[in-house]
Image (cartoon, helix red, strand yellow):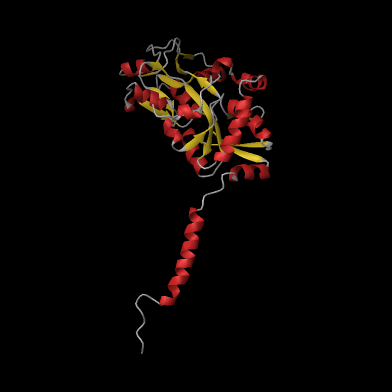
Amino acid sequence: MTRPDRNGPKTGWPILLFFLSAFLYSACKPVPAGGTLERIRKADEIRVGYANEAPFAFMDPASGRFTGEAPEIARHVISKLGVQNIRGVLTEFSSLIPGLKAGRFDLIAAGMYVTPQRCREVDFSDPTYRVGEAFIVARGNPLGLHGYEDVAGQSTARLGLVAGTIELQYADAVGIPKDRIRLFPDVPSALAGVRAGRVEALGGTGLTVQDMLKKAGDPNLERADPFHQPQVEGTPVFGYGAFAFRKGDAAFREIFNTELTRFLGTEAHRAAVRPFGFSSDELPRGMTAEQLCQPS
């Protein structure tokens, strides 16, 4: 009797190698750059990730409309691309980039700041606005907190921030200890933290703080005034917000950015964002994503 070969029949190897090669080619073959654009045009709908942070992107409870600075700009741009419908996908801010990369939505429209760290994970459009920082504090600002440096300098001061936002980098840059930083999943819970006395100050963009206080209507809360912008190497820093795209969606990003550039600064753009507190003062002043993605 012939002893079976311990490695199995030799005649099966060519077939196995053929299917293995075919699988590897299929797995490694790049996705066509125009894939997302073609798909949303065919569906006549784009899925947009947002974190329910007014005035950048939120669901208006009165009208049920997905709105804010970023969604209204996106509506104009995608209409120029032949897409009429926009569907918001609510996500915690810290999960926006993972959600985009996982394909839960096609675009992030949340007023997300462009930073070199984020540029390593996603691609950005050119920015749509520039804005500074602000604090919400208890009435009378008991600890006299007028900037991130003030929080760092007072051992009893605790700072509230929304998880995943750029403000955490500002806090780290000025030396606020991590054990005096409280992270919240979203804006409403962060505001509740100030009310409950769990933090002495809540950091956010000036526009976010302005909107939060207006909607809260709470006489026991106020905006820290004056406010000193955080500084990096002696220069006050400002945040620049933009739309985010998956790496590999270069064609979609390019055509979106072209229409966006045509729109920014026009009277139609100003009218679209004016209801959310944006004015000519918040225009990005020629700043580009390429500049903002450069390591500092």
- Residue displayed at 52% across by 50% down: 30
What is the x, y in percent for residue 244?
53, 34
- Does residue 282 appear to the left or right of 138 in the view shown? right
Q: Nearer the viewer, residue 152 or 281?
A: 281
Q: Position of residue 78 (x, y in %)?
A: 65, 34
Residue 255 shows up from this direction: yes
Q: Which of the pair 186/40 is nearer the observer?
A: 40
Residue 110, image x and y in percent? 54, 30
Q: Residue at x 44, y 24 (%)?
A: 193
Q: Residue at x 58, y 39 (%)?
A: 252
The N terminus, quarter of image: bottom left
Q: Nearer the viewer, residue 140 or 66?
A: 66
Specify whether residue 64 is in view: no
289 and 64: which one is in front? 289
Q: Quadrant of residue 262?
A: top right
Residue 124 image position (x, y, % from top left) = 51, 33
Q: Quadrant of residue 199?
A: top left
54 is higher (above) or lower (below) than 98: above
| Residue at image coords 33%, 19% | 152
Instruction: Give the answer, above or below, for where 145 lies relative to 64.
Output: above
Pick out the residue farthest to the bottom: 1
Quarter of the image with the C terminus is top left
In the displayed structure image, the side of residue 18 where residue 58 appears, left or right: right
Q: Is residue 204 above or below residue 85?
A: above
Tally the marks: 0
**Looking at the image, is 155 positioned above or below residue 7?**
above
